[in-house]
Amino acid sequence: MKASLRDPGSLKEAFTDLYEPEPGYPRTMACRITELILDCADPVRMAAFWCEVLGYVEIGKDGEDIEIGPPGVGFGGPQPTLILSRSDDPKPGKLPLHLDVNPTDRDQDAELERLLAAGARPADVGQTGEESWHVLADPEGNVFCLLRKRVEP
């Protein structure tokens, strides 16, 4: 597994007080997801796509790999960063994983239009048409879902 492109430094302390656990849950967790690594043929193209989709910015580079994350936060913040990692063979032997995204400032239909304009395309994974979510593919064919519920940014 790759080391982080950023050192969290004092960010851990800065964010600890912002998030209070539910009653009955410990204040700390054993571990949490800080990065998601997506193997891809064209990290530059994929970083641009996911920055547009998520409102992320480029926060680091390591060779051909590009790390993106929330503006002004970077690695170690409350949301995981994404590392777009150059690979000639991104599929075989990998953990089957897809991302779910939720709109933050518009309804699902408006967000679907925005994602399609950014380069996403509808994907058929055997859904019935009765689902409350849309299945899409990014520019390299990686499937992700647009959920209905609007969430805070």
Image (cartoon, helix red, strand yellow):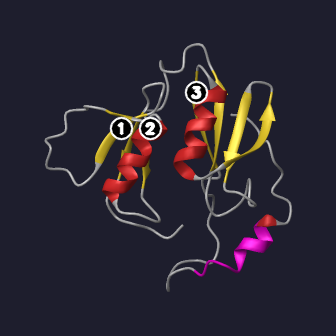
Left/right of residue 5 with respect to residue 18 in the rendered view: right
Camera sees residue 98: no
Residue located beneath label 3 in the image: 39
Dividing the picture into quadrants, the one containing residue 147 is: bottom left
Looking at the picture, which amino acid does disc 2 mark? Leu
The residues tagged by marks 3 and 1 sit, at their Cα atoms, a distance apart of 18 Å
Please report the bounds of the magenta region as a residue range: 12-20
Q: Dot 2: what SS? A: loop
Which is closer to the viewer, label 2 or label 1? Answer: 1
Q: Which mark is residue 97?
A: 2
Q: Is residue 27 above or below residue 105?
A: below
Question: Within 10 angstroms of label 1, few (less than 14), some, or many (20 or more) residues?
Answer: many
Secondary structure beneath dot 3 equals: strand
Q: Residues within 10 Å of mark 3 (few under 14, many from 20)?
A: many
CB within 8 Å, label 2 to label 3: no
User: Which of the 4 image quarters holds residue 108?
Assistant: bottom left
Where, by quadrant of the figure, is residue 137 drawn? top left
Q: Residue at x 31, y 59 (%)?
A: 148
Kind of residue at disc 1: Leu
Q: Position of residue 30 (x, y in %)?
A: 63, 62
Residue at mark 2 to residue at mark 3: CA–CA distance: 11 Å
